[in-house]
């Protein structure tokens, strides 16, 4: 195939070269057709298994989500849905090809419908098609990407990213997507190069690709010159990495001698494996929603306690800030978040959702109070908009402590702090009696600039250096200094070398970032002032 170069926007730096894998792309049949009876039995069993999955999910989910799942069960049990596939099987087709092709026709019919209600049902059908196919092929979950692959997709969910193994390299190229999405953040944290906003990509026939995350470029069927250039870029990056490594294990201090705390952001305790705690002053943000599976049962108190304890023990006495669930927005959790909100970033997300589901929130607060026995654990509440939300959380924490005491379980009351990421909180920060504050610059920027963090077309406006955003950051920092409470900043801006001077100018003295940004940011702090 002739080489093609595509230009998108940088989302995570680094270079990758490898086999190209199209996600959600054309279906490739994998079964060899047996007898018509065998294929019919295989399809029927796969449909029954999918119905059983959905019934279990519906029972766990309850509410609106259960209704949607029950609707899907009814669709799947409708004989009219499977009849075309059964006819194709009778004519000699393998069960997987028969199912996917017949459902494909029905999806296309729904998509072409005039009525928006029927159009929206196409997504349900697609979901059902994939679920039954997974059972037919014996892959319980989405097929994994081959190691080292460059994954091409319209967009990709955080749970899909987390399910993949990136240790052998690889990269992500998205037709849509945004640098401010959670997947981009995860990609930066794991050192997975990523380019977004490439637009529709016709990649048929291309088997290999190369990606330069920092330049926002993708090459399909790269030539020898591309490969040589990327190898040189990778060597430069290693050199810059060595410079950062010099300061990596030293406390961060500016040229004029001011100490700056450098903490790390984590999503999942397994990210800490192989990481030396001495590289940081602690953990400034744990995004617990990413430890919750995107679907299936919510983790119980015991398993949450185990995960939080593992993080606190890794830190070996350093402070560990664990944020309570920030589900919603671009982090849906089946059975918990509200499906179909017209604007999920302005809806029931973060503490708003936790407070309407106190039975879920209390489990997390109890697990946190139990883990606090093992180190310096602090609890941080996301999306606080009014003081009443912080106070309601405090009351639930009181109740959690009482509950644990009644069960005679060891527990310690953690300090209760808040994220400052909603303009209403940042603008009137003196109203909030939090033990500490952490500025969520990702959300603060999207809400102040009215530019969604997951819409590439407005990425230029979602700029943390907008004077309005920087002014709010400076005011929150000044408030913390005045009343003697810590203010840190844990949004992606904290890990951007080029933003270090602006954030320190604004009075920030504590930054929390992806682990791989620690070296370069410490080096930038050393050059400041
Ligand atoms: C933020 O909004 O800056 C933040 C740290 O929270 P999240 O990115 O998880 O929404
Ligand atoms: Mg946020």
Image (cartoon, helix red, strand yellow):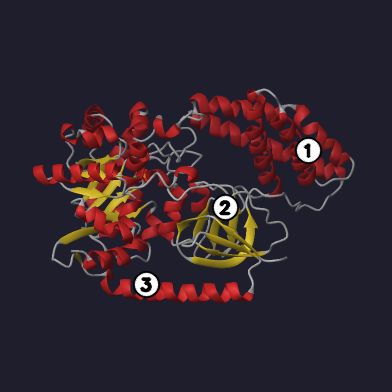
Q: Which of marks 3 and 2 is nearer the N terminus?
A: 2
In this view of the protein, which residue sits in the foreground, 8 or 116?
8
> Marks 3 and 1: in contact by CB < 8 Å?
no
Q: Name the residue under label 1.
A: 102
Q: Name the residue under label 2.
A: 198
Q: In which quarter of the image is residue 239?
A: bottom left
In this view of the protein, which residue sits in the foreground, 120 or 223?
223
Q: Is residue 484 above or below residue 426?
A: below
Circle on res. 241:
3
In this view of the protein, which residue sits in the foreground, 517 or 133?
517
Q: Is residue 42 left or right of residue 163?
A: right
CA–CA distance between discs 1 and 3? 52 Å
Tell me where residue 161 appears, x and y as whole percent. 51, 52
Point 36% across, 39% down: residue: 449
Residue 264 shows up from this direction: no
Q: In this view, does 383 lie to the left or right of 483?
A: right
Residue 10 shows up from this direction: yes
For the N terminus, which image quadrant?
bottom right
């Amino acid at each position: 195939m002739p080489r093609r170069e595509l230009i998108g926007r940088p989302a995570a730096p680094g270079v990758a070269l490898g086999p190209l894998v199209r996600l959600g792309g054309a279906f490739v049949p994998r079964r060899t057709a047996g007898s018509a009876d065998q294929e019919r039995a295989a399809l029927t069993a796969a449909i029954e298994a999918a119905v059983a999955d959905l019934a279990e999910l519906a029972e766990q989910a309850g509410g609106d989500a259960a209704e949607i799942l029950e609707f899907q069960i009814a669709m799947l049990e409708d004989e009219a849905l499977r009849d075309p596939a059964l006819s194709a099987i009778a004519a000699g087709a393998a069960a997987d090809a028969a199912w996917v092709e017949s459902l494909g026709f029905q999806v296309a019919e729904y998509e072409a419908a005039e009525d928006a209600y029927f159009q929206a049902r196409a997504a349900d059908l697609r979901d059902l098609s994939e679920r039954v196919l997974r059972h037919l092929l014996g892959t319980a979950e989405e097929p994994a990407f081959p190691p080292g692959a460059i994954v091409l997709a319209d967009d990709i969910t955080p749970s899909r990213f987390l399910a993949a193994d990136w240790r052998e390299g690889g990269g992500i190229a998205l037709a849509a997507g945004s640098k401010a999405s959670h997947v981009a953040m995860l990609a930066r944290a794991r050192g997975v190069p990523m380019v977004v906003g490439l637009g529709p990509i016709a990649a048929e026939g291309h088997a290999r690709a190369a990606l330069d995350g920092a330049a926002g470029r993708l090459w399909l069927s790269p030539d020898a010159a591309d490969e040589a250039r990327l190898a040189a870029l990778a060597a430069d990056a290693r050199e810059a990495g060595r410079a950062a490594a010099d300061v990596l294990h030293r406390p961060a201090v500016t040229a004029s001698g001011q100490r700056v705390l450098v903490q790390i952001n984590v999503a999942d305790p397994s990210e800490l494996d192989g990481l030396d705690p001495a590289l940081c002053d602690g953990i400034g943000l744990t995004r617990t929603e990413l430890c919750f599976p995107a679907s299936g049962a919510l983790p119980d108190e015991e398993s949450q306690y185990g995960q939080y304890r593992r993080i606190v023990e890794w830190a070996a006495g350093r402070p560990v800030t664990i944020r309570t669930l920030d589900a919603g927005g671009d982090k849906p959790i089946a059975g918990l978040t509200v499906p179909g909100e017209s604007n999920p970033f302005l809806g029931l997300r973060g503490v708003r959702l936790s407070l309407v589901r106190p039975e879920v929130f209390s489990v997390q607060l109890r697990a946190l109070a139990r883990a606090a026995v093992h180190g310096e654990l602090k609890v941080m509440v996301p999306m606080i908009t009014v003081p009443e939300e912080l106070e309601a959380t405090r009351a639930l924490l009181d109740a959690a402590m009482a509950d644990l005491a009644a069960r005679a379980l060891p527990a310690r009351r953690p300090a209760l702090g808040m994220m400052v990421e909603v303009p209403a909180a940042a603008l009137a920060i003196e109203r909030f009696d939090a033990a500490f504050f952490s500025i969520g610059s990702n959300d603060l920027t999207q809400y102040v600039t009215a530019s969604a963090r997951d819409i590439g077309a407005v990425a230029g406006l979602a700029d943390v250096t907008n004077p309005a955003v920087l002014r709010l950051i400076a005011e929150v920092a000044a408030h913390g200094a005045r009343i003697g409470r810590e203010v840190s900043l844990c949004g992606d801006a904290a890990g951007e070398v080029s933003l270090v001077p602006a954030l320190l100018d604004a009075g920030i003295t504590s930054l929390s970032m992806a682990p791989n940004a620690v070296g370069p940011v410490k080096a930038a702090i050393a050059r400041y002032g």
